[in-house]
Image: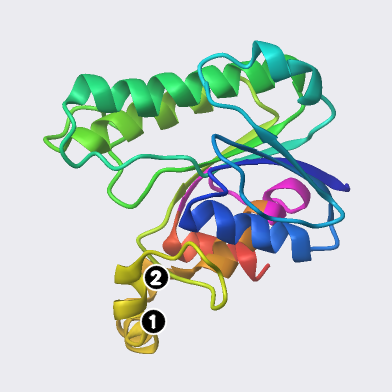
Amino acid sequence: MKIKAIVTGATGMVGEGVLHECLLNTEVEEVLIINRKPSAESHPKLKEIVHLDFFDFTSIEGNLSGYNACFFCLGVSSIGMKEAEYNHLTYDLTMHVAKTLLRINPEMVFCYVSGAGTDSTEKGRTMWARVKGKTENHLIGLGFRKTFMFRPAYIQPTKGLKRVQKGYWVLAWAYPVWKSLFPKFVCTLRELGIAMIHTLNKDYEKYILESNDIVRLAND
């Protein structure tokens, strides 16, 4: 199956890395990125929509049909936020986008990046983990052809990309050590992108993917 993917969050580190792998991969025929500001990316198989309001896609719905994958990498930090605000910008926004895409592309595969420590019970003490857990649970129940929740811990950045957070480069030198000592908790940004691509054409027994699952699927 040739892949036509929508990528959100391409102006962030994870989204940029996933987009990079999509543009390199021969299985991916077309990529549409939806951003609030221009990405300055250019590639023959890349399309871009700059759209400010992710709670209202009415004006761009006509451009969203014909895609069989969504790699949802958009997210905000919970630091300094009350739960209601974080819930609105995480759960409400994600569900609105997902429901819109499902209505337009009912055979779509949806991949969502949450993070290690996400709370599927929705009852734990950590606010962001509860909200992410609720988001995951409701995405799984929407009815996409396949839905995968990506929960990476430490992500080794891809050299040459522009949007890597400074803290990652400070820690990047230690990746071989962490890979040796804590293999279940590390993956590369390249593996994350390839694993998402593989969700369409390869079978995997889990739909919640921790770092070691991401590595395994990427190398399958």
Q: Quadrant of residue 185?
A: bottom left
Query: As displayed, is residue 47 above or below residue 151?
Result: above
Q: Quadrant of residue 134?
A: top left
As drawn, the label of residue 117 is none
Q: Quadrant of residue 90?
A: top left
Write down the region rendered in magenta: 197-209
- Residue, x 27% and y 28% (percent of image)? 86
Q: Amino acid at mark 1?
A: Lys
Pinpoint residue 17: horizontal percent, then vertical percent. Answer: 57, 61
- Residue, x 70% and y 29% (percent of image)? 145
Disc 1 residue crowd, few under 14, some 14–19, many 20+, Cα 10 Å: some
- Residue, x 16% and y 26% (percent of image)? 82
Q: Is residue 142 visible?
A: no
- Residue, x 85% and y 62% (percent of image)? 26
- Badge 2 element: strand
Q: Circle 1 sits on which residue?
A: 179
Q: Spot the residue most to the left.
A: 125
Q: Circle 2 sits on which residue?
A: 186
- Badge 1 element: helix
**Horizontal arrangement in the rendering, residue 108 relative to residue 124 (left or right):** right
